[in-house]
Image (cartoon, rainbow, N blue to C red):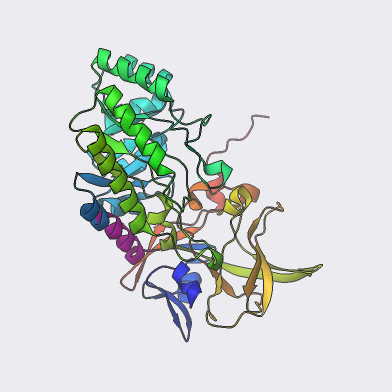
């Protein structure tokens, strides 16, 4: 059954319905309510081990893996990253506060951001092991702050001018992108670092997210290595060629992109490039992005109504745009299974949509499903990345509860928001 390959590794289709991590989804929905987000630790562990073991085998130099906090971050997820010896990529004070509270060590915290505020930089100087410098103004701010406290390691973010095949909103390395610095600016920044005695330790670039083909990485790696030679890096420097490796969101995108092949491609390109330039291998720091976490997550919704509109059948759910804006942003079409009837044959094509006042409040268009009735539960796979982290309170929506599944046990890791939470920041006018 191909559709199960979109779900977490521990998913089972039983006589009573879907089971993930040894837990029955109907029981979970009755206990915690819907919409409900589930994270399967077994799938997370397998993905992390695959990256680490493949890197150890393919890359003879020292290497590491960075978890993208922007994919989804909470105390529990940050704790899990440390069980797997991962670095964590943070943007801004909020994400840094979460990982520090979770006990992430300073040397494993790397701070990104295209427009870090002075407060972000002050926090990063105190708490991070690495700051990725995006532009010269940021470098000048760091220099002005360095008189009060020593700076952590600095990497310069390089804009390699390479365009990858993905949605335009998630391309990041092309010429004219808002991210990073071109060759001339990088050399200028490196010169400032050398003259000021700053701890310049590496280069970072990122071509985009949801990449399924590694070939465009070749010119980007070549240009980064040329930059490293010009800057004068020798031993003990780091190259982070970003990440952004993709996942399949529906059956039409299967099979899953080849993670081992992706890692092998990067490792081989760096090894050959360093040999050609007679330079030592850098520390290789990969950022797997969604490929580490997306398939571990499942969203569970309850059907509120089924209605016909012209030639379309709309299955209206109790969640959508407010907890998952990715269809509206990127046109993503999700798959789904009926929780109590996961093996039922598909009979009709439906559009899955939420309750919000936007035509873009859709999860999937023309999705083959069995006939669905009001009150049934629907499970949407590949919901672990860039959904809750981009969620909102649109139409007064309360963000869903999140539950961690491991070894037959379910643990609440984020409570469902309530209307009281929505009012907590508000103040009445004195009128």
Magenta residue check for 48 = yes
Q: Does 192 sit left or right of 4 as displayed?
A: left
Say which residue appears at 41% left-offset and 36% top-offset. Answer: 91
- The reply to whether residue 265 is visible in this rendering is yes
Q: Does 188 sit left or right of 308 as displayed?
A: left
Whether residue 204 is situated above or below residue 364 in the rendered picture: above
| Residue 26 spot, x, y in % from top left | 49, 76
| Residue 296 spot, x, y in % from top left | 41, 62
| Residue 374 spot, x, y in % from top left | 66, 75
Image quadrant occupied by the C terminus: top right
Count of numbered labels shown in the rendering:
0
The foreground one among 412 and 42 is 42
The foreground one among 179 and 125 is 179
Q: Quadrant of residue 310?
A: bottom right
Q: Quadrant of residue 142?
A: top left
The secondary structure making up most of the magenta span is: helix
Magenta residue check for 267 = no
| Residue 394 spot, x, y in % from top left | 62, 48
- The reply to whether residue 101 is visible in this rendering is no
Whether residue 365 is situated above or below residue 329 in the rendered picture: below
Whether residue 301 is situated above or below residue 172 in the rendered picture: below
The foreground one among 381 and 396 is 381
Say which residue appears at 35% left-offset and 33% top-offset. Answer: 224
Q: Does 366 sit left or right of 61 as displayed?
A: right
Q: Does 127 sit left or right of 346 as displayed?
A: left
Please give the range of residues in magenta. 38-52
């Amino acid at each position: 059954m191909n559709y199960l390959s979109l779900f977490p590794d521990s998913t089972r289709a039983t006589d009573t319905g879907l089971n993930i991590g040894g837990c029955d989804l109907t029981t979970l929905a009755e206990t915690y309510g819907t919409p409900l987000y589930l994270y399967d630790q077994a799938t997370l562990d397998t993905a992390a081990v695959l990256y680490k073991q493949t890197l150890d085998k393919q890359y003879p130099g020292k290497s590491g893996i960075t978890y993208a906090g922007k994919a989804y971050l909470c105390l529990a997820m940050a704790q899990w990253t440390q069980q797997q010896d991962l670095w964590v990529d943070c943007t801004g004070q909020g994400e840094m506060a979460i990982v520090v509270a979770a006990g992430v060590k300073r040397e494993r915290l790397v701070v990104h951001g295209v427009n870090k505020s002075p407060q972000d930089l002050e926090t990063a100087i105190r708490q991070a092991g690495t700051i990725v410098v995006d532009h010269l103004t940021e470098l000048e701010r760091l220099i002005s702050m360095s008189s009060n406290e020593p700076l952590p390691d600095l990497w310069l973010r390089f804009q390699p001018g390479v365009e990858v095949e993905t949605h335009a909103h998630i391309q990041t390395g092309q010429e004219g992108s808002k991210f990073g610095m071109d060759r001339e600016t990088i050399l200028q920044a490196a010169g400032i670092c050398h003259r000021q005695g700053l701890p310049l330790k590496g280069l970072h670039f990122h071509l985009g997210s949801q990449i399924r083909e590694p070939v465009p990485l070749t010119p980007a790696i070549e240009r980064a290595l040329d930059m490293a030679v010009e800057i004068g890096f020798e031993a003990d420097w780091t190259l982070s060629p970003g990440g952004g490796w993709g996942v399949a969101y529906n059956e039409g995108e299967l099979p899953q992109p080849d993670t081992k092949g992706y890692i092998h491609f990067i490792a081989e390109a760096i090894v050959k490039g360093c040999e050609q330039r007679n330079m030592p291998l850098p520390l290789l720091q990969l950022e797997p992005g969604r490929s580490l976490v997306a398939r571990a997550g499942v969203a569970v919704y309850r059907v509120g109504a089924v209605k016909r509109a012209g030639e379309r059948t709309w299955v209206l759910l109790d969640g959508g745009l407010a907890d998952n804006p990715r269809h509206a942003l990127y046109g993503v079409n999700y798959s789904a299974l009926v929780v109590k009837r996961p093996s039922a044959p598909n009979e009709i094509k439906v559009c899955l949509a939420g309750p919000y006042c936007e035509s873009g409040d859709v999860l999937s268009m023309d999705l083959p499903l069995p006939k669905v009735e009001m009150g049934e539960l629907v499970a949407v796979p590949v919901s672990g990345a860039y959904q809750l982290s981009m969620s909102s309170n649109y139409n007064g929506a309360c963000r869903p509860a999140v539950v961690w599944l491991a070894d037959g046990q379910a643990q609440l890791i984020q409570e469902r928001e309530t209307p009281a939470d929505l009012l907590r920041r508000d103040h009445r006018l004195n009128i």
